[in-house]
Image (cartoon, helix red, strand yellow):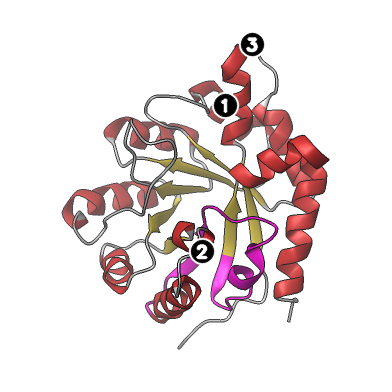
Amino acid sequence: MTLHARTLRLGVNIDHVATVRNARGGAHPDPLAAAQAALAAGADGITLHLREDRRHIRDDDVARIRAAITAPINLEMAATAEMLRIARDTTPHAACLVPERRAEVTTEGGLDVAGQREALRPVVAALAAAGIRVSLFIDPDTPQLEAAAAIGAPVVELHTGAYAHGGPGELDRLARAAERGASLGLECHAGHGLTHDNVGPVAALPQVVELNIGHFLIGQAILEGLPAAVRRMKALMQAARPPG
């Protein structure tokens, strides 16, 4: 049976607040303050990616934010022993496994779950055993969805980058993937490259439960402030799929 979500959550990724801070050093702007501002403006959770090279979010950011806020924290991470240890130590609400390459500017493409089942299966199991909701960041393709379900991941986040770049047929591809994911019993999230201008059609997909948006909101905060950017995003999401 296909599930239709009545509500749609917004997770705000604050990685690039840390990018700005790290460009000069010091403590300003503080990712924790940004997380608190986003939540006050209506965000439902906070996403942060602790990369292996620590190019933006750092270990102490994860610890401080985890200690200071009660809203769900979604820790994006590579499927490595180091990151698994950190996730177990900090116990975020959720951990989203993503592919990671040192040379990339940002995450490029989804995790190849179909090709890495046996490597990913124990990581998914270990996170679940620690009480952490596991999500896999994947391209919106049937083999990846079926592999995610097969290794026991309860959640997938559909990579919306190709849609955001205007690829023909990409919205239909996302719609088919969301429907297939829901039919497999997977909770479906989506994210990457979403903006005020393009979020509506993705927000309207009835099986999608959560959108995770970061770079655009932090960039837009320069022009209108983070609370205003978050409130507008949430309003556009709600307009695309009114509750009930």
Q: How far apart in space, not on screen, are marks 1 and 3 (Cα)? A: 12 Å
Q: Is residue 98 above or below residue 243?
A: above
Q: Secondary structure at mark 2?
A: loop
Label 2 CA crowd tier, 10 Å (few <14, some 14–19, many 20+): few
Q: Is residue 218 magenta?
A: no
Residue at numbered disc 3: 26
Looking at marks 1 and 3 on the same chain, the residue that comes earlier in the sequence is marked by: 1
Residue at point 37%, 62% (across, down): 139
| Left or right: 43, with 179 as reference point | right
Residue 219 at x, y percent in the picture: 67, 39
Q: Is residue 71 above or below residue 182?
A: above
Q: CB of mark 1 within 8 Å of CB of mark 3?
A: no
Q: How far apart in space, not on screen, are marks 3 and 2 (Cα)? A: 38 Å
Q: Secondary structure at mark 3?
A: loop
Tell me the amino acid under the disc marked 2.
Answer: Gly
Residue at numbered disc 2: 166
Q: Is residue 200 above or below residue 76?
A: below
- The quarter of the image holding the C terminus is bottom right
Q: Name the mark on residue 19.
A: 1
